[in-house]
Amino acid sequence: MKLIKAVIKPFKLEEVKDALSEIGVEGMTVSEVKGFGRQKGHTEIYRGSEYTVDFLPKVKIEIGVADDLTDKVVDAIVGAAQTGKIGDGKIFILPMEECVRIRTGEKGDEAL
Amino acid sequence: MAIILAFSNAVPAHADDHEETPAAEEEAGPVDDYLELLEAQGEYAPAYDFFTTSMLWTVIAAALVFLMHLGFATLESGLCQKKNTVNILFKNVFIISIGVLTYAFFGFNTHYPGDFNGWFSWGGMIGDLNADGGSTWGYGGLGLAMTGFGDFIFQAMFAATGATIVSGAVAERVKLSAFMIFAVLFVGVAYPVAGSWHWGGGVLADIGFKDFAGSTVVHAFGGFGALACVMVLGPRRGKYTENGIKPIPAHNFPLAAIGVFLLMFGWYGFNGGSVLSAEPGALGLVFTTTTLAACAGALGAMFTSWFALKKPDLSMALNGILAGLVGITANADVVSVGSAILIGLIAGIIVVFAITFFDKSKIDDPVGAISVHGVCGIWGTLAVAIFADGFDFMVQLKGALLVSIFAFVFAYIVFTVLKAIMGVRVSEEEEDRGLDITEHGQEAYTN
């Protein structure tokens, strides 16, 4: 099992969710986050004075998946979230030790 | 017939107290028109209709001016940081409440003392204002076509405005208790005293000073009081650094925009109600000049900010509408349509440069109140002499400076004394955490 964490542009969330639904992903956890990468921040202007906004708003999606589905999920996220411009985000793939469905106590792939 | 006689007698007496300018006296149109009408028809009805309509308009105008306090509340909270929203709203609730009460206790009778030395006369609580005239026009005749209570409630809504202007300028770091004491003295004592010089028939009325609805008496008064308070108080932490100005952006532009549109809506009562009757000619002119100046002010600020500050800045456009309105307030009843546009446009240009000037001078005014109300208030007062016939520039300048300097000195002394006794500023930690939590133990935006 893998835990996939994807940080994407906020307006891409709907498209990513649809793409994941299509390949059979049945759940995900989404958080509003802030951060920066090579994109850095951007400059804003207020009453004639410029200032930099370092942390840009992003959306983080977390999905637990079975090993054999990992590549398909990653491809779906890349396909849906890509704009080709700087700041598209990153996907982190972590090994996942265990997963428990709280309602039934099921464990492992059954619980995903 | 007795009623008609009483009415004719009442007019000249009140004309002395309330008519503001030589021009307004020459105009004395409505009274003459209706006296003729009465003579021709021998009827009580037509004048009473006019009186009733006028009184109705006056109380509607009072309600519109009340709505301006909602406009100030949303504008100020929108332009500040979200951690200080509860504090700003709390101050606004306090100011309108205490403003009306102090005006009833002593403000109104200090503001309109009747015969006095021209500088100061302390007035007591309002009595039964219907005693003089009751529900007829005995109170003010047809030139001031309202009852005593109508006059009181309309003027009471104005009274709190001075402190509301200060509230925006000192936002995000002023100590609540100190500000509340200041507000009581500023709206309760200083405003009616300064107001009596002009509208109460005092020294400014004697020299022919013209300020229709209060560019100087209300707005410059509040603006220069705000300047004094900000100078005593100092800027918000982190605003002026070694690397230059670090802006503290507005947290909610939609709220700020709602506030400005509400203020413009309320201004129809502020200026329109200051006609003091429903005289059709004056009402139409005042509504038109007020609107044109506001729109021209917006455009002036929009394009000035676009060219001078590189970007079309919404906060400047919003300040521009208000600048145009403050600019037209002194002269809305005596200028032409073209002049109104020019007055508003120039106010909109002035306000952008005034805001950047104060910012460069490290006078930290989160909402631009000093520029909008102080600087454009003086501009509107001078514009009377520039754009209308029959007014003296030096008299206008003298009046504007007298009231502004008085407000500045009064506020400076009161704030300095408060600073020595109890402090006027919250601690650095309190400022960093926000006044909502530290002063009120509440947040504006919770789950």
Image: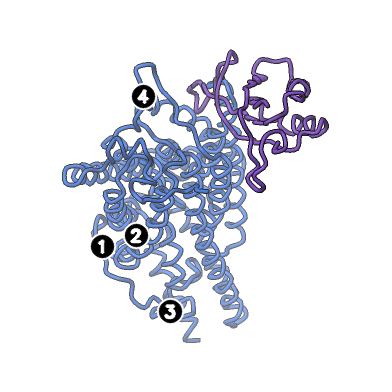
Which of the pair B120/A90 is nearer the observer?
Answer: A90
Mark 1 and mark 3 in contact? Answer it, CB < 8 Å: no
Q: Are marks 1 and 4 on the same chain?
A: yes
Q: Position of residue B378 (x, y in %)?
A: 41, 39
Three-letter code for the amino acid on which mark 3 is drawn: Gly
| Residue placed furthest toward the left | B421
Disc 4 versus disc 3: distance between alpha carbons? 58 Å
CA gap, disc 2 to disc 4? 43 Å
Q: Secondary structure at mark 2?
A: loop
Q: Label 1 is found on which chain of the structure?
A: B
Circles 4 and 3: CB atoms closer than 8 Å: no
Q: Which tag is nearer the camera, tag 2 or tag 4?
A: 4
Q: Residues within 10 Å of mark 3 (few under 14, many from 20)?
A: some
The residue under the point 83% across, 32% down is: A22
SS at badge 4: strand
Q: Where is residue B256 drawn, in percent x and y? A: 54, 42
Secondary element under disc 3, as helix, strand or loop, is loop
Q: How far is disc 1 from disc 3 in space, using C-alphas?
A: 22 Å
Disc 3 target residue = B133
Asked if badge 2 and badge 3 are on a common chain, one would say yes
| Residue of label 1 | B116
Chain label for disc 2 = B
Q: Are dots 4 and 3 on a single chain?
A: yes
